[in-house]
Amino acid sequence: MNDTTQNSTPPPVGYPEREVVVQMKDIHLAFDGRQILRGIDLTVYRGETLVILGGSGCGKSTLLNCMTGSLVPDRGTVEVLGSHVCDLTEKQLDSHRIKVGFLFQHGALFQSMNVRDNLACVLREHSTLTEEEIDILVKMKLELVGLRHTVDLRPSQLSGGMRKRVALARALVLDPPLMLYDEPGAGLDPVSLAGVDRIIATLARVLGITSLVVTHHMASALRIADRLIFLHGGRVIVEGTPDEFRTHTNPLLRQFLDGAAEGPLTEAGVDDDYAVSLLGKERRS
Amino acid sequence: MGPGMMRRTMIAVGDWGSAVGQALYWLTPSRLRSRTGVVPARLVIEQIDRFSIGVMPLLVVVLGFVGMILALQLATILEILGVVEFLPNIVGIAMVREMAPLLTGVVLSGFAGASIASEIGSMKVSEELHAYESFSISPTRYLLAPRLLGIAIAAPLVTALGFYIGIGGGLVIAEGILGMEWGQYLARTAAALKVEDVVLGLVKGEVFGLTVVSIAWFEGSRVTGGALGVGRATTAAVVKSVVAVIAADLFLTVLFYQIG
């Protein structure tokens, strides 16, 4: 278990020889002059489920977007499935992205298509399968998330949880070795969330898919994770297994895990001199 | 216009040109023939329907009324000059060369421009555009190319329909108020119009349609800031489309005038 950022993350306990799937080194990224990431080092091993925790706006989703090449860090290197993502051309990025499944926060299903075509269009684009074969594969993937009966429905006819599961089926349609989940529990009731968690865990356990999950749901995170990292201020503050996180004493993590309104996380955002910010310097005297 | 604004405008025009260029790439014969490069026909048909059948009720009302107004205004002057029998000639030429394509462009700006910008903007906000990218599927091919192809087919059709509606509006006034015989009215209109007039009108309609769709796409795909951003993009798309349509109209009119 680490309490601060380290230059290289050790493999999870018990798996010293595992293959590295994602390796990020010294990642810095700023938007509009605001520094989001300040030297992130991250290693993910084949078959493991790594959960990224942290407050809103701390750069969790940004990290995922760096892995797909949608964002290019200002500094540092991103190696995913053996490719240096920052150095890839547009064409190479296209090949890279089909190896990385991405579950968007709100599903991001193609609204103009029904459920079948949401999955089928990806296969039509990237395979030489016949329409018959595509139809069978689409139904298999939908069965995996328990939604084979929705094949002819439009996304607008689905509930939030169903949309998320269809999006998951779509993300899996090309059998990617790496899955990135951006807030899979956002907007879901506890039962739907448990269902999505079960699918994520099954994919990792049965199919050996490497998973990176960004979430705010603590119960969910502790349920599915092999390993967790906690981001704050653009850095990895704590890293460890679920059991280590449960008993960790870092005050920032403690406040986050306990969901306490007051603590070091919230104090960090409070202006030292409220009167100055409210009234201006000259009014103070 | 300061240098900063000039630079931003140049960048925006460059980005717009790049988006149109990418869409045209997907419409080249070699791409259209390839298996994976094909622009889905179903999506193109949907867009043709949207830009023709969808826009028709509005076009009938706008061009019908404008045809009537034009005939009434002209009739007053032509009666004073004692040449009211030339009314069909003037209404016909004005409609085909200018009013029908221009008003079709304006109607498309309000109808297609607003709907495309808000639709694409919503896709941007809901990460749908990002999803296309994450699956290495070109949003230009699936979203812009069908819209451009759809408007390229629908715009001349609705412009031609606009000719008839506008001339029909004039006919209603000529027969109903001025007592002209409808057969005579139509014969004079047909005699006054040349093939070049019709070609000019249709070319204008085509250019206006493509301009509106490409601007609306561009504004929609640049949305930032959620629902407020979608609203801003929709307004910008309509305003810029109307201005661009009028500017293109002036350019084409001057060009055809020079050509003769």
Image: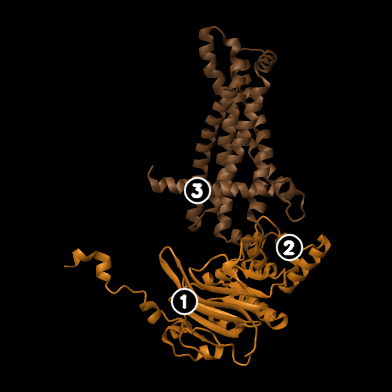
Residue B12 is labelled as 3
Residue position marked by numbered label 2 in the rendering: A126
The chain letter under disc 2 is A
Residue type (three-letter) at the residue carrying disc 2: His
Q: Which chain is displayed in orange in the rendered image?
A: A
Q: Which color is chain B depicted in?
A: brown
Q: Which of the pair A193/B177 is nearer the observer?
A: A193
Residue B65 placement (x, y as % from top left)? 57, 27
**Residue B245 position by quadrant:** top right
Is disc 1 placed on a helix, strand or loop? Answer: strand
Instruction: Specify whether residue B65 is in view.
Output: no
Residue type (three-letter) at the residue carrying disc 1: Gly
- Residue at point 59%, 25% (across, down): B256
Instruction: Specify whether residue B124 is in view.
Output: yes
Residue position marked by numbered label 1 in the rendering: A39
**Mark 1 or 2, nearer chain start:** 1
Is disc 3 placed on a helix, strand or loop? Answer: helix
Residue type (three-letter) at the residue carrying disc 3: Ala
In the displayed structure, does residue B147 sit left or right of residue A134? left
* Residue B61 drawn above or below residue B195: below
Separation of disc 2 and disc 3 at Cα? 32 Å
Residue A50 placement (x, y as % from top left)? 58, 81
